[in-house]
Amino acid sequence: MRRLLIDVTSTVQTGFNTGIQRVVRNIAKLMPEIAERSGILVEHVVFDGVDFRIIELDHNIRCFSRKAAFWNKVERKARAIAPLLMAHADRSSKLRKLGIGPWRHYTRWQPAPTDILLMPDATWNYHPWTALREAREAGCKIHAVVYDLLPLKYPQFFDDGLVAAFRDWWEIMGYYTDAYHCISKSVKSDVVTRLPITAKNDVVIDDFPMGADFSQAGDRLAQTAAPPIPHIDWEKSTVFLMVGTLEPRKNHVFVLNAFDLIWRKSNNACLVIVGRRGWLSDSLWRRILAHPLLNKNLFILDHCNDKLLQQLYSNVDAVIAASIDEGYGLPIIEAEANGVAVLASDIPVFREVAGPNVAFFSLDSISALSEALLEFASREKSGPPFDSRGRELSSHTWRASVDKLYARLTEACVMSDD
């Protein structure tokens, strides 16, 4: 039987549920059923510092056994206490010798010629090169999901260490990758333009869409109840929402500057920021925590599950997507699916994914954005300026997304077999 191995290393280790991890979780959850129709067995693997190991996952994409969960906790603490030691362990057999990590309790993956290894996770965080070489020598096909090439395009927006790791990953992965599956046509264009010199001559480059539905989408309470955020008068206030990790490219500073202009004229506008603290964001974080309107007109939620996020989408007046560049723009699709208007920066990928409920603004003028937000607020209170029925979701569910990825994957395999 042909096997499809899905790498979930970083998602299981971090426990995050944003961005890449949201995609990985849905692929891991939905792909087994989809692939079963073709008689392909799907298994999940993690990299232990030396080998890939086949693991069992629960419905939340966590290690299934209590023993594994315990070792996962030990590993996280070890990384927090001794990051340099753990970084060295990741690059050598020391990880297994130290007994760190739950993976030692699981079966080592023995690559076979009919196997396919799909790598949808943040692979640049570890170094699986020896294991990939073994898989390649066994005849295994290796496929990578590409979310963006932003560290290559905008190194000034990322930590130097991440830029170097990402650049190394991109060049080395070229030796092993049979197909790149990109999350948008814009990313596909970037991959074609920046294809590493190590890439195979017959490498396949394609794209597939993201999903926008939530695991609790059927929960009517999640769709209708007001989010538990004190001090917001949901009836009288115009509430704007930003969703995304706090890091320079997301442009929170630009938006916050615009709201500071608004709050000089009106106290009816609220800005809710959902996102964990990211890189190069210390000054932004301090500014938010010291802001005189914090928890009055400005709110920050750095831990937000799907239920709370959907409650926000169902109650806010508009979502703001102000990124300088993106690989996709998932908050736009999620907002439109919930009938929420979107104000988005005028960048190509947002033009690609946007539907009828999106208005665009330039990143050239803070005051222009401020005026646009005030105008939106005034129109919103006299009647919604956008179609509030919600964007059709049929082609933007996670099942449709994973279905398309599976189709792309099998098409690429047929092409490479030929």
Image (cartoon, grey):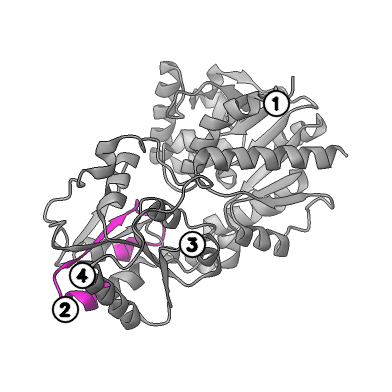
Marks 1 and 4: CB-CB under 8 Å? Answer: no
Badge 4 local density, few (<14 within 10 Å), some, or many (20+)?
A: few
Q: Residue at x 70, y 26 (%)?
A: 38
The span shown in magenta is: 259-284
Residue under label 4, please give it: 382
Real-space Cα separation, disc 1 to disc 3, in angstroms: 33 Å
Q: Which mark is residue 38?
A: 1
Disc sitting over residue 354 in the figure: 3
Q: Quadrant of residue 37?
A: top right
Please tell me which residue lies in front, 340 or 146.
340
* Separation of residues labelled 2 and 3 (CA atoms): 31 Å
The first of marks 4 and 3 along the sequence is: 3
What's the mark number on residue 264? 2
Q: Residue at x 54, y 58 (%)?
A: 327
Q: Amino acid at mark 3?
A: Ala
Amino acid at pointer 2: Arg
Q: Quadrant of the C terminus?
A: top right
